[in-house]
């Protein structure tokens, strides 16, 4: 697969890390930056001190605050923006996405308004034919460690396996390994829903529940994710792989996890408002919790952990009370 023009939308930690990975292989990468401060830093010091401090960026990264310039006439458009901004960013530039433009989406989440996954949002804006040129990246991959060239293994999911294999070759290095799958639904759901379980894991740690509780939470969280995924047509094996179990373990156990950290602060007694106003980083799980709960209700799928996280974040339920309710639920075969 020949790829020359590459645009990346989103200069957060993940977008910057992926841009640097591709640029380090000799490709020119046009990176759309929203914040003037970040734009100036990348241009002047080759560093994104706000979102990815301490990492020297390749000179092949060409920052721009002009989204039209970055998105127009590109062979590949990599999208790494928060899910709540996905539609608002993609919609006005949809005219720039030609029939030859491939999309690689690194956004993980479920849209609040529509309960759509990112592939469904893209299809609604660009037409169903975009799915032949659509791929998403999933799996255990903190941006900081990718930027530090630490060993990382991910999955690219696409209906078009030929394209997926081309992207696999584009991203592969001796420290960044890429597998491919055709389960776009499963990869997206796993990547979005693990953030909800990670918030719960952070709460459990803050409440001092111990390692037994965390292991049980991860296991039962995976059951919830799989249950909803199968209802929506995903493949069972996806949830036992990198996009599912791999990403879930990482996000629930590491201090680098924004969603676990968010949950930890909730468990300590901080409010959602206090946490969100204290950082520029986005914990995707906050908005995804609302979407996931509403989606589970719509589909008639029982997701007790997700339900309690929703009640804590959106109804003010005390975390300790929510934990007791989960533990005292009636026992039944599942």
Image (cartoon, rainbow, N blue to C red):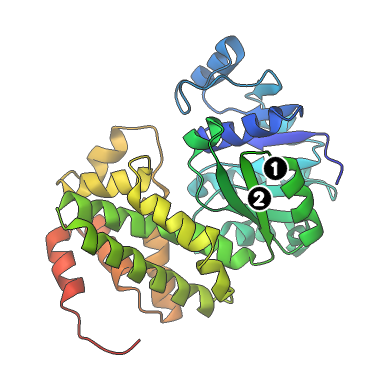
Cβ–Cβ under 8 Å for marks 2 and 1: yes
- The residue tagged with tag 1: helix, strand or loop? loop
| Relative vertical location of residue 248 with respect to residue 232 in this rendering, above or below | above
Q: Which residue is mark 1?
A: 172
Tell me where residue 223 appears, x and y as whole percent.
40, 73
Instruction: Give the spatial CA distance, label 2 vs label 1.
Output: 6 Å
Q: Compare residues 157 and 283 and report the one nearer the observer.
A: 157
Neighbour tally class for label 1: few under 14, some 14-19, many 20 plus, Cα within 10 Å: some
| Relative vertical location of residue 275 with respect to residue 227 in this rendering, above or below | above
Residue 110 in sight from this viewpoint:
no
Q: Is residue 207 left or right of residue 122?
A: left
- The residue tagged with tag 2: helix, strand or loop? strand
Q: Is residue 160 left or right of residue 178?
A: right
For image coordinates 70% across by 28% down, the residue present is: 23
Residue 58 in sight from this viewpoint:
yes
Q: Closer to the N terminus: mark 2 or mark 1?
A: 1
Q: Is residue 222 left or right of residue 43?
A: left
Q: Which residue sits furthest top?
A: 44
For image coordinates 85% across by 48% down, the residue present is: 100
* Number of numbered tags placed on the structure image: 2
| Relative vertical location of residue 197 with respect to residue 79 in this rendering, above or below | below
| Relative vertical location of residue 57 with respect to residue 95 in this rendering, above or below | above
Q: Which residue is mark 2?
A: 178
């Amino acid at each position: 697969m020949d790829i020359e023009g590459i645009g990346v939308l989103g200069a957060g930690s993940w977008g910057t890390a992926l841009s640097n990975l591709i640029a380090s292989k000799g490709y020119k990468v046009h990176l759309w930056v929203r914040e003037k401060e970040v734009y100036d830093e990348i241009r002047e010091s080759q560093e994104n001190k706000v979102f990815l401090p301490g990492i020297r960026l390749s000179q092949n990264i060409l920052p721009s605050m002009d989204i039209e310039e970055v998105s127009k006439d590109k062979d590949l458009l990599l999208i790494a923006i928060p899910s709540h901004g996905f539609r608002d960013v993609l919609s006005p530039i949809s005219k720039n996405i030609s029939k030859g433009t491939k999309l690689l989406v690194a956004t993980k989440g479920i849209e609040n308004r529509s309960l759509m996954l990112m592939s469904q949002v893209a299809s609604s804006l660009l037409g169903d034919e975009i799915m032949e040129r659509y791929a998403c990246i999933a799996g255990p991959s903190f941006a900081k460690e990718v930027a530090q060239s630490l060993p990382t293994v991910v999955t690219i999911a696409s209906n078009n396996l030929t394209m997926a294999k081309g992207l696999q070759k584009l991203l592969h290095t001796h420290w960044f390994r890429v597998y491919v799958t055709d389960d776009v639904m499963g990869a997206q759901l796993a990547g979005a829903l693990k953030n909800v379980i990670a918030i719960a894991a952070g709460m459990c740690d803050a409440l001092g529940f111990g390692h037994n509780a965390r292991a049980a939470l991860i296991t039962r969280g995976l059951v919830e994710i799989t249950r909803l995924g199968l209802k929506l047509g995903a493949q069972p094996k996806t949830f036992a792989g990198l996009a599912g179990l791999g990403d879930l373990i990482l996000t629930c156990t590491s201090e680098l996890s924004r969603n676990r950290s968010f949950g930890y602060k909730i468990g300590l007694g901080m409010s959602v408002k206090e946490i969100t106003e204290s950082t520029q980083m986005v914990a995707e799980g906050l908005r995804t919790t609302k979407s996931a709960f509403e989606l589970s209700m719509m589909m008639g799928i029982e997701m007790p952990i997700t339900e309690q996280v929703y009640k804590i974040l959106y109804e003010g339920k005390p975390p300790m009370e929510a934990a007791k309710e989960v533990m005292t639920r009636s026992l039944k075969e599942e």
